[in-house]
Amino acid sequence: MPQSLQGRMLAMSALVTATALLGRFAVNQVDRRLNSELSLLAGAVDRDGHVDEARLRRNPTHFQGWPDWQWRVRTPSRTISSAGFREIGLPLPAHMVGGAEQGKTSTLQTRRGPIELTAVQPLGPSQQRMEFALAPSLDALAILAPLLGAVSIIQIRLGLRPLRRLQNELAAIRDGRAERLGENQVSELLPLVREFNALAAANDAALTAARLSAANLAHALKTPVATLALDLRGDPAATAQLGRIQATIRHHLTRARMQTGQRRPSTPLLPAISGVVDAVVRLHREHTLTIETELPMDLRLAVDAQDLDELLGNLIDNAARYAASRVIARAQPDTADARWVQLTIMDDGPGMSAEERQRIGRPGLRLDESGPGYGFGLAIVRELTALYGGSFSLSCADGGGLTVQVNLPAAHGI
Amino acid sequence: MRILLVEDDCDLGPAIARALRAEQFAVDHATNGIDAAHLGETEHYHAAVLDLGLPGRDGFAVLRQWRDADRPLPVLILTARDAWSDKVAGFKAGADDYLVKPFRLEELVMRLRALVRRAAGHARPRLECGPLALETQTGQFELDGLPLRLTALEWRVLSLLMLHRGAVIERLDLLERVYEGDAEVDSNSLEVIIGRLRKKIGATLIETVRGRGYRLAFDRP
């Protein structure tokens, strides 16, 4: 069997067409034959109901070609039949016998009552005759077959259109343009669609549960660590160990929080950046600071909303921490490749040495090795950016200050 | 200064309360969301330290209740939730500051002092009134440039007068904002404290406004 549904359906329809065509010709031939046999049998019966048995027996010429033809004449008083009739073993029903018309019965009304005439052809001859049947019909088939084929192809195309639509809907879910499949599907696909939607819902629930348990773990671990930190004030060695524990917790929780789902999200950048800038300004209220944002209103990123907050928060908070007075956050579609959005965060702080920049940019660096401060936040940003296939680079402006440039995937459409 | 501390952890809560009291704050400690919501609505605090994961009522719900009731109480969220989405949500819900556990106590105290100072309308960390100065980041008072030693109650009364220098502070207001909720207050104790303060900083800086309360003389040299 062909591997594609289209192939299977086409093959099936070709088979059915051919059989139907051939079968029809053969059956027609046979039917015609049976009719002539019946009229021969009828010729041996007169109006009074008298059966001319001698004539029946004498009449082999017509049957000679097909020696297995059988017949039977049943009058109210007796039954006459060809020698092999019973052996064929067909207790004939009213009109027809078998799937193909292998036997035929007709009833003559005579003065002596109804006389039933039956002509039967065994299976063998009809099949042999198929070849005879084929010969005259080949021309007709040659014309009909391509026509029927074309009709089948159109039919299958139309029939399979809902599948193609389903495929588009699935792609939309993956691109983050839709959450679930629509339920306005053809009835055959509806159970499949419902199953898929249930699976997607279960998946979402599992993801949420995983995130929640990560958050719970954070809460469970951090409060005792905070208590310990209060108790161990003034013990630098213990405090340093606690610092390592905290860094490790942060590292693994940040990793656990990063989205690993397959669906492509679509998050508007402007509200995310406004929320984060507001939070950073409040967190650094004791520090006289202006944070300017420059970005188009309608920019959307294919980045999960929480991940985007994390990315922006770390970028802008880092810049605010080191800035003398000013931070600029700028976003624009990448001029070279519209599939990406370029995010640039600049501060007017002391900047970073080339070695430091290299250390932060090194791919193997783990979050818990990078320590607190500048490095830690930027290492999170670098990991998150890598998760979305984006690029991350650090540079120093001429007048000092650090510029972080991050490329993130743009989300298109809604 | 009187602080409402909302923390359900039975180790961390008392530890923070002890540490804040050591920094001269009066501390009322609530261990669940329902008590916290009620205290914040009915008592007078200079600021609240609010945990988010609370029994009875989530910290966010408590904060929203205060904001819906138009309570201007400055709120510092102290939580283990360190995701930026949580921080953004916290500020959107009406928080004034956000500190992630584990934290350094110095930072909590510094942020609380700054919160209280800003809520009183002062942008600069150093408050001055004649010969008297308060470095709000450290909580240190200076008189003529020299450090001033004060007891906890003296410090609370003087810093309250300093935050609102020039304005009359009602006696009842002072009492409410200086003593912890469960303290037994002797009606004469305020006079005693004012008397001791006058001995330390000079008799003229603190004026008595008859029938109303006290005022830190703003215009005096």
Image (cartoon, coloured by chain):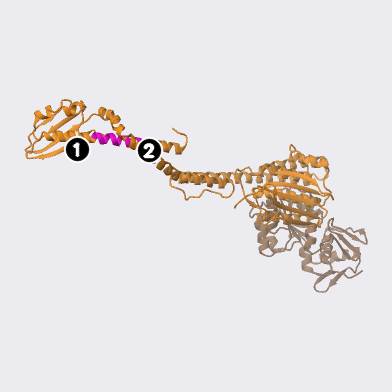
Residue A252 percent location from the top left of the image: 69, 41
Q: Identify the image quadrant of residue B43.
A: bottom right
Specify start and end residues of the magenta stretch as a single range: A16-30
Evaluate whether label 1 is on the same chain as label 2.
yes
Say whether disc 1 or disc 2 marks the residue closer to the N-terminus.
Answer: 1
Does the magenta-highlighted stretch encompass residue A26? yes
Residue B216 percent location from the top left of the image: 85, 68
Q: Specify whether A87 is left or right of A75.
A: right
- Check residue A164 in the rendering and tell me which mark sits there, or answer none: none
The residue beneath circle 1 is A94
The number of numbered badges drawn on the structure is 2
* Badge nearest the viewer, 1 or 2: 2
Q: For the point 67% across and 51% down, which residue is it?
A: B53
Instruction: Look at the image and tell me whether residue A282 can be seen.
Output: no
- Check residue A145 in the rendering and tell me which mark sits there, or answer none: 2
Q: For the point 56% across and 45% down, which residue is it?
A: A171
Identity of the amino acid at label 2?
Ala
Residue B58 percent location from the top left of the image: 65, 54
Q: Chain of mark 1?
A: A
Chain drawn brown in the picture: B
Q: Main secondary structure of the magenta part?
A: helix
Distance from disc 1 to disc 2, alpha carbons, whole Å, reads 36 Å
Q: Specify whether A215 is left or right of A149.
A: right
Identity of the amino acid at label 1?
Ala
Q: Chain of mark 2?
A: A
Q: Hue of chain A?
A: orange
Element assignment for label 2: helix
